[in-house]
Amino acid sequence: MSSRIAELIVSLEQEQTLELVRVRSAAGEDPLALLEECRQGMLDVGQLFHEGEFYLSELMISGEIFKGAMAILEPYLEQVRGGDPIGVVVLATMRGDIHDLGKNIVATLLRVHNFEVHDLGVNVEPETLVEKVKEISPDIVGFSALITTAFESTRRATELLVEEGLRENLKVVVGGGVTTPEFGEYIGADLQTLDASTGVAYCLEAVGAA
Ligand code: B12
């Protein structure tokens, strides 16, 4: 069943969505649960786009609403933060893909858990990612993929990590709406997930902090 927040996002009601997120987070509701309701709304928007009911402008408005909700929720998420870094993560959305909302959530959650996060942004060239890995030797590389046309650049990045002898020293995790377990296998990821919390739990385990 669709939540009220998800319904408001699908109706592109920016003010009402943000007000409800504000009120419910101030009332002490779990910010992760609220985030999940927002994500459901985005999935519904994506479905309407897929069915030809919505156009790019609707996708863009929903993206703005989501960003607004994230800005409200971030301080609540960060309240639990503190202490020394427990591990280093490089995050990226690869060439051909400009979606970043999911990746930004993962970055926030990892920082909340005291990971040092290097977010390379969107449309990242495989070579750029590999250079960064050489430079900082992260424990984990996280890819976000929302569009199938970026699958090849994501795979190229993992291939390059192998070719450069960097792969065995780190874990690779991948997430994002269009990814599947098969895609995870295709790029040789250690974990594929559609759930940021599962990704974070895996990262904690990978650095021995679970
Ligand atoms: C918002 C949106 C946009 C916005 C993006 C704004 C932004 N700053 O990101 C805009 C308007 C820019 C956009 C553009 C386009 N989009 Co768009 N977009 C969406 C939409 C509706 C929501 C995506 C989203 O942000 N979801 C909310 C977030 C929170 O969810 P998430 O990313 O899945 O992340 C969660 C998990 O997956 C996970 N996660 C994500 N990344 C990672 C990484 C790691 C390491 C881990 C552990 C976990 C993890 O954690 C998150 C929280 O739980 C989707 C629909 C959908 N089904 O996903 C379409 C969708 C992704 N878009 C699509 C398309 C086709 C496009 C365009 C090509 C449209 C066009 N004709 O121009 C362009 C692409 C441009 C490009 N080259 O990238 C298609 C892709 C289809 C496909 N099979 O490839 C989709 C699926 C819509 C559809 N059903 O057709 N889009």
Image (tube, rainbow, N blue to C red):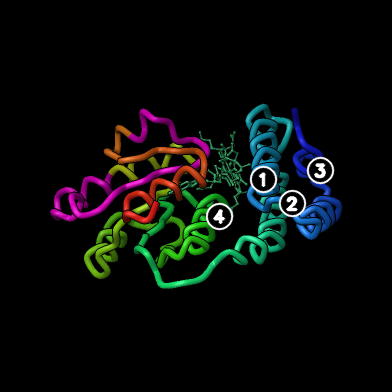
The answer to whether residue 179 is above or below residue 93 is: above
Q: Name the quarter where the N terminus is drawn.
A: top right
Dots 1 and 2: beta carbons under 8 Å?
Answer: yes
Answer whether residue 97 is magenta in the image: no
Q: Residue at x 29, y 49 (%)?
A: 171
Closer to viewer: mark 2 or mark 4: 2
The residue that label 1 is drawn on is: 33
For badge 3, the amino acid type reads: Leu
Picture quadrant where residue 123 is located: bottom left
Q: Residue at x 55, y 55 (%)?
A: 105
For badge 1, the amino acid type reads: Ala
Query: Reading the chain from its start, which is encountered first: label 1 or label 3?
Result: 3
Closer to viewer: mark 1 or mark 3: 1
Closer to viewer: mark 1 or mark 4: 1
Closer to viewer: mark 2 or mark 3: 2
Residue span colored magenta: 156-184
The residue that label 2 is drawn on is: 29
Dots 2 and 4: beta carbons under 8 Å?
Answer: no
Label 1 Cα crowd, 10 Å radius (few <14 / some 14-19 / many 20+): few
The residue that label 3 is drawn on is: 8
Q: Residue at x 45, y 43 (%)?
A: 175
Q: Report, in whole angstroms, how far the alpha carbon at label 3 lies from the one at label 4.
A: 20 Å
